[in-house]
Image (cartoon, rainbow, N blue to C red):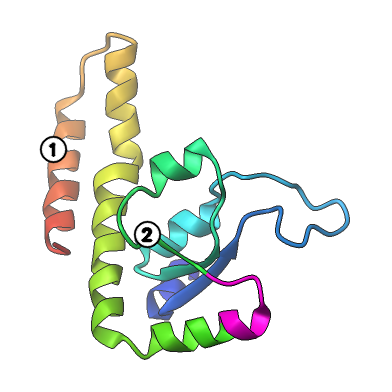
Amino acid sequence: MLFKLLHRTRISLAFHLYVEPQGNRPRSMMVTSRWLESLLSGCIVAGRRPSSRMAEDMLFWPGATVELADDPCQAGEEVLDLLARNDELAAQRRSNIRNMLLHHDWRHRIRSMCGFFGLPVPSALDEDLGRVRALAEQFA
């Protein structure tokens, strides 16, 4: 259900966990599942990206995230400006889906773990990854 809702959403707001920390909320510069789910669904992720090696490694493609101004009024204007650029949004949505499929599908990690532990890669895994790559190319 969440994925369907995100797929219909053009922009997803996401902020690292040091932005306005309140109460006992965790504080971290990690990339949470909200970022990944939003990107895979094709959302433009706007807000305040984590400043960490993890974020740099995971969100490496151009336009993966959009940094919004600290001033709420200015940030609102930036979001409205983004929404007015339909062709750019459509291209970035495709890029986000493609990059998520090519770099963050769990099957890539399972394949890497097989290599790390010296285990044979199951043929079904390679077949699945071939289908993931083919699906990703539909978003090129």
Residue 12 position in % (x across, y down): 50, 72
Residue 112 position in % (x across, y down): 30, 24
Q: Which residues are magenta?
A: 68-75
The label nearer to you, 1 versus 2, is 2
Three-letter amino acid code at the position of disc 1: Glu
Verify whether residue 42 appears in magenta: no
Kindly indicate the quadrant of the structure image that contains residue 44.
Answer: bottom left
Is residue 62 left or right of 120 when viewed as pictured?
right
Above or below 46: residue 90: below
Q: Residue at x 23, y 73 (%)?
A: 91
Front-lying residue, 124 or 106:
106
How many marks the image carries: the answer is 2
Pointer 2 local density, CA inside 10 Å: few below 14, some 14–19, many at least 20: many
User: Which label number is shown at residue 64?
Assistant: 2
Verify whether residue 73 appears in magenta: yes
Front-lying residue, 128 or 20:
20
Residue 69 position in % (x across, y down): 58, 72
Three-letter amino acid code at the position of disc 2: Ala
Residue picked out by circle 1: 127
Q: Earlier in the sequence, mark 1 or mark 2?
A: 2
Is residue 54 left or right of 132 when viewed as pictured?
right
Front-lying residue, 13 or 81:
81
Kindly indicate the quadrant of the structure image that contains residue 98.
Answer: bottom left
